[in-house]
């Protein structure tokens, strides 16, 4: 089963010219539906949380979930195809996001 690793990700709407945390998320893990009669696409979900204030303070300090296959899929926008979520691997960016996360979710 393909699953995203725990860590920080940018959603495809992330603007590199904007704040480091715009459309940034932290993947907490994978969950599964507890009912046997759920749709197969809903059986496994990615559990994650936003690392940008506009969203957090609008919806409260809660986790988001998205079907695993949807999290991992590619999207096409303006004729270009790319992952819906891209793992962040830059250590400097990760350290900045950790600091923002720790302040937001104390």
Image (cartoon, helix red, strand yellow):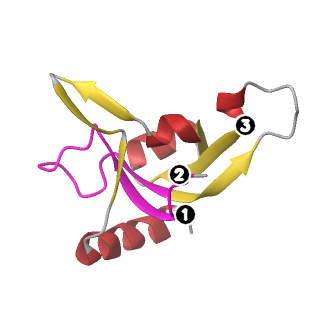
Tag 1 and tag 2, C-beta contact below 8 Å = yes
The residue tagged 3 is 43
Q: Is residue 46 left or right of residue 24?
A: right
Rendered location of residue 98, percent (x, y): 41, 72
What kind of element bears circle 3? loop
Rendered location of residue 31, percent (x, y): 71, 50
User: Which residue is at a point 36% across and 39% down the rendered structure image?
Assistant: 84
Q: Main secondary structure of the magenta part?
A: loop
Task: Assign the C terminus to one quadrant of the image.
Answer: bottom right
Q: Tell me the tag on residue 105.
A: 1
Q: Is residue 102 above or below residue 62?
A: below
Which residue is outermost to the left?
17
Is residue 65 part of the magenta span, yes or no?
no
Q: Is residue 19 above or below residue 88?
A: above
Q: Quadrant of residue 43?
A: top right
Q: Tell me the tag on residue 91.
A: none
Disc 3 and disc 1: Cα gap in Å?
28 Å
Q: Considering only order in the chain, which callout, 1 or 3, is on the residue closer to the N terminus?
A: 3
The residue tagged 2 is 49
Rendered location of residue 58, percent (x, y): 50, 36
Which residue range is magenta in the image? 2-26
Mark closer to the observer (3, 2): 3
Tag 3 and tag 2, C-beta contact below 8 Å = no
User: Which residue is at a point 88% across and 32% down the rendered structure image?
Assistant: 36
Q: Considering only order in the chain, which callout, 2 or 3, is on the residue closer to the N terminus?
A: 3
What kind of element bears circle 1? loop
**Res. 21 in view:** yes
How crowded is the residue under tag 3: few (<14 C-alpha within 10 Å), some, or many (20+)? some
Q: Is residue 86 above or below residue 84?
A: below
Q: Is residue 100 left or right of residue 102?
A: left
User: Which residue is at a point 38% across and 55% down the rendered structure image?
Assistant: 9
């Amino acid at each position: 089963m393909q699953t995203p690793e725990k860590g920080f990700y940018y959603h495809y709407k992330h603007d590199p010219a904007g704040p480091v945390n715009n459309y940034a998320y932290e993947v907490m893990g994978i969950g599964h539906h507890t009912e046997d009669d759920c749709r197969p696409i809903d059986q496994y979900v990615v559990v994650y949380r936003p690392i940008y204030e506009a969203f957090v303070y609008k919806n409260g300090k809660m986790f988001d979930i998205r079907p695993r296959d949807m999290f991992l899929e590619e999207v096409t926008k303006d004729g270009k195809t790319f992952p819906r979520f891209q793992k962040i691997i830059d250590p400097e960016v990760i350290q900045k996001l950790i600091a923002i996360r720790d302040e937001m979710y104390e």
